[in-house]
Image (cartoon, rainbow, N blue to C red):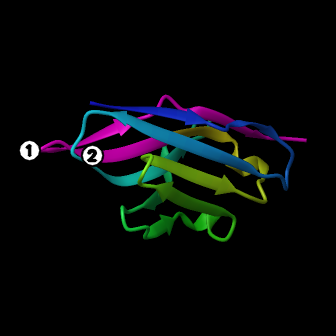
Amino acid sequence: QVNLVESGGGLVQPGGSLRLSCAASGHFFSINDMGWYRQAPGKQREVVATITPGGSANYTDSVKGRFTISRDNFVNTAYLQMNTLNPQDTAVYYCYVSWSDYLYEHSSWGRGTQVTVSS
């Protein structure tokens, strides 16, 4: 089982920055893809960014050039650096991890961290 602890959310003014962290812990053979999703009020959860163990990243179009996902495989932690935030980025951000035991691949979700962009 893998547990995820997210941190770094909060209230920021438009144009500001935040950095989210997601630390994975527990019993596993490997951590595979990691990612961030978000869900705004009244909307479906959407993918924001994902990153492979080798560091290959993908982003949804609305955050390209503003957000950067990274990971530290030594401490099983993913980061999301968010710059030039705008009110449309307001949402609960969820960390996602794909992980493997010796037999199967599994997925785990964090509890979410609120990001509010407002003046």
Q: Quadrant of the C terminus?
A: top right
Say which residue appears at 54% left-offset and 35% top-offset.
Answer: 6
Q: Classify residue 106 by image quadrant.
A: top left
Q: Tell me, yes or no, if residue 32 can be seen here.
A: yes
Q: Which residue is mark 2?
A: 99
Q: Callout 2: helix, strand or loop?
A: strand
Residue plotted at (47% across, 67% down): 58
Residue at 45%, 58% in the rendered image: 50
Q: Kindly report the secondary structure that dominates the magenta region of the rendered protein.
A: strand
**Looking at the image, residue 57 lies above or below residue 47:** below
Q: Is residue 44 visible?
A: no
Q: Which residues are magenta?
A: 95-119
Q: Against 100, is 62 above or below?
A: below
Where residue 84 appears, as percent x and y from the top left, is 78, 59
Which percent across, then down, holds residue 86? 78, 53
Residue sitting at 69 percent across and 55 percent down? Answer: 82
Amino acid type for the residue under numbered disc 2: Trp
Residue with the mark numbered 1: 103
